[in-house]
Image (cartoon, rainbow, N blue to C red):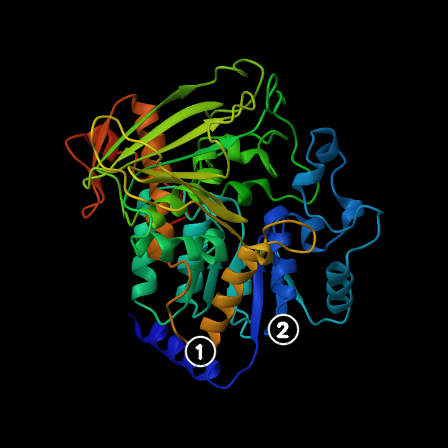
Amino acid sequence: MTRREFVLGSAALAAAGSRERVRMGFIGVGNRGTQLLHIFMKNPKVEVVALCDIYEPFLRRDFDAFDPKFFEWGLRGRIPSLRNRTGEVKPQEARLAEMIKAGKIALYKDYKALLADPNVDAVCIATPDHWHAIMTIDAVKAGKDVYCEKPLTATVAEGRAMVNAQKNSRQVVAVGLNRRGNDAYRELKKAIDSGAYGEFRTGRAARVSNIFPNGLGKCPPCDPPKGLDWDKWLGPRAWRPYKYTTAPYYFRWHTDFSSQVGNWGVHYLDAMRWMMSETAPRFITAVGGQYYTAGRSDSEIPDTMFCLYEFASGKVMEFNVFEGGRSWPLRQGEVELAGGDATIYADQRGWEVKPATSKEFNNPVRKVEPTKYVFKEALLDDGSAESATKNVIADFIDRCLDRNPQVLCSLEDGHRSTCFAHLANIAFKLGRRLEWDAEAERFVGCDEANALLHYAYRPGYALG
């Protein structure tokens, strides 16, 4: 730790001990950033003091200035929701507008300027994935606590660099893997660890949607929307021309920026490895392809994918992507955990135990009672399960105030779970079963795979 970092950390520690609210800055206030902003605003221990975005209408909360082509390209539900269904401005947005007008919220297009603002205690980072590592490390060095949205990183190397940066600081850092804050999953973990349902050897989950037949569609290169700094949006990634099928939301379908194993998979993979008490796989296999949308979409990722994770313990996890049609691989819930005595189906609303009723040959049947656990409080008034995110955020704010670094989802856990996505994408790209050394965070005997653990940033960008 440098002397400057020590001084910044000491000052933040002293200030934290005397305050009752956390002054938050938000970096990236597009679709997910706005959702998180609204949740943070409902916490009485939060004061919003700064916003940052490289698209001017998002930053200034000007819905009427949003590029109309966003709507033509099907992005209505994937851009900031500033108004309710009747067209009225949402209460949180009305409050933001008043505060911005009164000069109580600073607006920045450069995140480094926000990090230099002494009025900011902590930041929420909800930018595209390829920016998370650089911004988190810079924020920690600036003496700011950090809440970073999932998926945590774009590469394995980025995650370890983030973990190391926090270790050399006094900052609190939490990751938005929200099932860590879901009460149904937390109760399920206690039940599994008690041994009440036996040992679970396999886990399964899937991302199911239907983008058949045209996926994102095909958009020719064009000028970026007015007010968008496209070069800055690309950041460390190689330059490419702007397309409406890349940003602001569709970057999830481009290999430089994300994947559906990363976007959705990390939620379920994190939940399964948590329930099964696993850290990292020993072997990874991934197959798939564009079986439904090839040639009709600008997407670069598979619309169908099968990812298999084998553990040294003898357990196995499976995650699948089914975006070509609504295939339902599970009997119910979003995660299946199976063992010789019972199968559990779980989601954020609760879980159900299905006991084994018979066994082949003459093996005894271990008696497990059928159990159904429904956690109604897991839902918000609108029927969504966002209360899990609310819990992770509330925990982060409390840890910012009491300076206890033990958050619900740590950087280490966020990194380990995000690695599952990166490992599967690498195995898919190379078309082979790979062996992983979790301690060294290297592939065994495969230089070609190890070369994909990171990429060369554009000049002017670096990890720290």
Q: Image point 18% across, 40% down: which residue?
A: 312
Residue under pointer 1 = 402
Residue 463 can be seen, yes or no? no
Q: Is residue 360 above or below residue 14?
A: above
Q: Position of residue 415 (x, y in %)?
A: 35, 50
At mark 1, the secondary structure is helix
Q: How many marks?
A: 2
Rounded to the nearest angstrom, the CA distance separating label 2 from label 1 is: 16 Å
Q: Residue furthest left?
A: 445
114, 49: nearer the viewer = 49
Mark 2 falls on what kind of element? loop
Q: Amino acid at mark 1?
A: Asp
Task: Identify the residue at image location x=59%, y=58%.
Answer: 377
What's the residue type where badge 2 is placed? Pro
For residue 44, the mark is 2
Examine the rendering and report whether any part of residue 459 can be seen.
yes
Q: Position of residue 451 (x, y in %)?
A: 26, 34
Mark 2 and mark 1 lie on one chain; the one further toward the N terminus is: 2
Which quarter shows the N terminus?
Answer: bottom left
Q: Nearer the viewer, residue 404 or 385?
A: 385
Residue drawn at the location 61% of the way across and 44% of the way down: 229
Res 104 quadrant in image: bottom right
Location of residue 325 by image quarter:
top right
Residue 246, by quadrant, is: top right
In the rendered image, which quarter contains the C terminus? bottom left
Residue toward you, 38 or 100: 38
Instruction: Judge whether 245 appears above or below 351 on screen.
Output: above
